[in-house]
């Protein structure tokens, strides 16, 4: 078991390094229009994808079940599927420059997943089902394909932005990029405090009168107990997780300010030149096709397979658990997007902004709902 775990960790680390390196030749290829750099970048990405598959297989061998049962495993697999989806789309459309934007998103997902425990543990009873693997793998694959639509929509909007003016579109794009930087901030601050901060315990009394202890892994800013010496918040809010959110947005905002100060211009101005190698119409087409593929796959994994697993695990197909509700919201949102595209002729910028919002809903469901909102899926 230990040898397989070592192999999985090593393969994943090497994949992360290769993907990080691959961004450079992708950028050079776009700026210089040299196909040799693009070929190097694609080779590095392909090798990294192979290493990610080795991680997945080796960890499966080590733990004895499909490694998609916690946040570390799910976000890692999400990243693997995103790289696979990019390679598939770049092969179909011969547009390798998408990798310059897709790979950083995949690295963010890997970095986010690495913050959580990678310890191999036995599954709780509700997770001991093959339908869990079918459900989660399908959801991750569909989410990755839908993420490609986010990437190409970002490229489409960046390409069409008039960066000489401050408009609603430029402000919205800056908001999107700021949120991506906040994820970087979360990864950085979590990693730093993991190495330097000793966990602290705060005891308080919950609303039902039961004594509760919260273990903080970051310096304490807020607590549920007014006598704890920190800013007190209501007990119906998880102060420990809210504390993490404050640190993440604080660190992410500071990082964004530093980036703005160093380059002395908004990030969308820096990124715009890297989007000009693809025709806007083709970007719009790729985004639409990705949704056409990802949506029915999500329908299977996020609803149909999920209901089968719910029946096996909890004896009911639907229970209005927060995770189930947000899966339904995600499904309805993309259904509305396709309806507006097909029947109302919404294309171009409208579809691109909707695809970005859809990606935000996916991340909200996979991250915020899993971690902050109490429910049956809080095991993650």
Image (tube, rainbow, N blue to C red):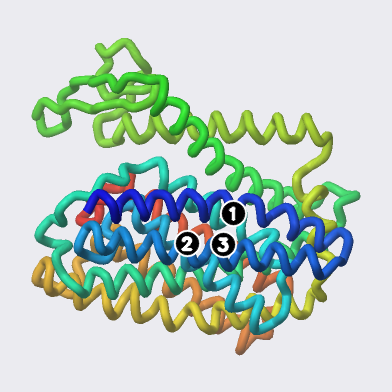
Give the distance between the C-alpha atoms of the residues marked 2 and 1, in whole angstroms. Answer: 10 Å
Above/below status of 243 relative to 135: above
**Drawn side of residue 157 relative to residue 104, left or right:** right
Q: Residues within 10 Å of mark 1 (few under 14, many from 20)?
A: many
Give the image quarter of residue 185.
Answer: top right
Residue beneath label 1, please?
A: 18
Which residue position holds label 3?
A: 357
Instruction: Give the x, y percent position of residue 123.
Output: 16, 56
Residue at 13% of width from left, 62% of height from top?
126
Query: CA separation, marks 2 and 3?
Result: 31 Å
Question: Which residue is labeled 2 in the image?
Answer: 51
Left or right of residue 138: residue 65: left
Q: Please name whichever residue, 142 or 319, is drawn nearer the observer in this view of the structure.
A: 142
Whether the residues at callouts 2 and 1 have beta carbons within 8 Å, the answer is yes
Report x, y in % for residue 132: 23, 69
User: What is the quadrant of residue 98 in the picture?
Assistant: bottom right
For image coordinates 32% across by 68% down, the residue present is 136
Q: Position of residue 157 (x, y in %)?
A: 75, 63
């Amino acid at each position: 078991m230990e040898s397989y775990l070592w192999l999985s960790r090593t393969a994943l680390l090497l994949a992360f390094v290769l993907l990080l390196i691959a961004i450079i030749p992708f950028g050079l290829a776009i700026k210089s229009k040299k196909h040799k750099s693009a070929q190097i970048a694609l080779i590095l990405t392909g090798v990294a994808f192979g290493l990610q598959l080795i991680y997945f297989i080796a960890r499966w061998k080590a733990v004895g079940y499909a490694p998609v049962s916690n946040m570390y495993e799910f976000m890692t697999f999400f990243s693997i599927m995103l790289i696979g989806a990019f390679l598939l789309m770049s092969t179909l459309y011969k547009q390798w420059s998408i990798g310059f934007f897709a790979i950083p998103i995949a690295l963010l997902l890997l970095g986010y997943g690495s913050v959580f425990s990678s310890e191999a543990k036995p599954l709780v009873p509700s997770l001991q089902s093959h339908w869990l693997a079918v459900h989660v793998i399908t959801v991750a694959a569909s989410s990755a394909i839908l993420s490609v639509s986010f990437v190409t929509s970002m490229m489409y909007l960046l390409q069409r932005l008039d960066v000489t003016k401050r408009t609603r579109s430029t402000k919205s794009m800056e908001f999107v990029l700021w949120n991506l930087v906040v994820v970087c901030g979360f990864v950085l601050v979590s990693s730093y405090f993991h190495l330097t901060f000793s966990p602290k315990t705060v005891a308080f009394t919950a609303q039902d009168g039961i004594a509760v202890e919260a273990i903080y892994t970051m310096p304490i800013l807020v607590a549920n107990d007014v006598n704890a010496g920190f800013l007190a918040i209501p007990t119906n809010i998880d102060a420990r997780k809210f504390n993490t959110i404050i640190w993440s947005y604080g660190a992410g905002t500071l990082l964004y300010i530093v980036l703005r100060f160093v380059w002395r211009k908004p990030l969308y101005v820096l990124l715009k030149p890297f989007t000009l190698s693809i025709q806007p119409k083709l970007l719009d087409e790729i985004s639409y096709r990705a949704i056409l593929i990802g949506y029915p796959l999500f329908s299977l994994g996020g609803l149909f397979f999920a209901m089968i697993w719910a029946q096996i695990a909890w004896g009911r197909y639907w229970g209005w658990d927060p995770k189930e509700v947000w899966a339904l919201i995600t499904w309805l949102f993309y259904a509305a997007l396709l309806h507006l595209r097909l029947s109302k002729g919404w294309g171009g910028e409208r579809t691109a902004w909707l695809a970005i919002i859809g990606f935000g809903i996916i991340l909200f469901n996979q991250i915020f709902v899993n971690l902050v909102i109490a429910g049956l899926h809080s095991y993650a």
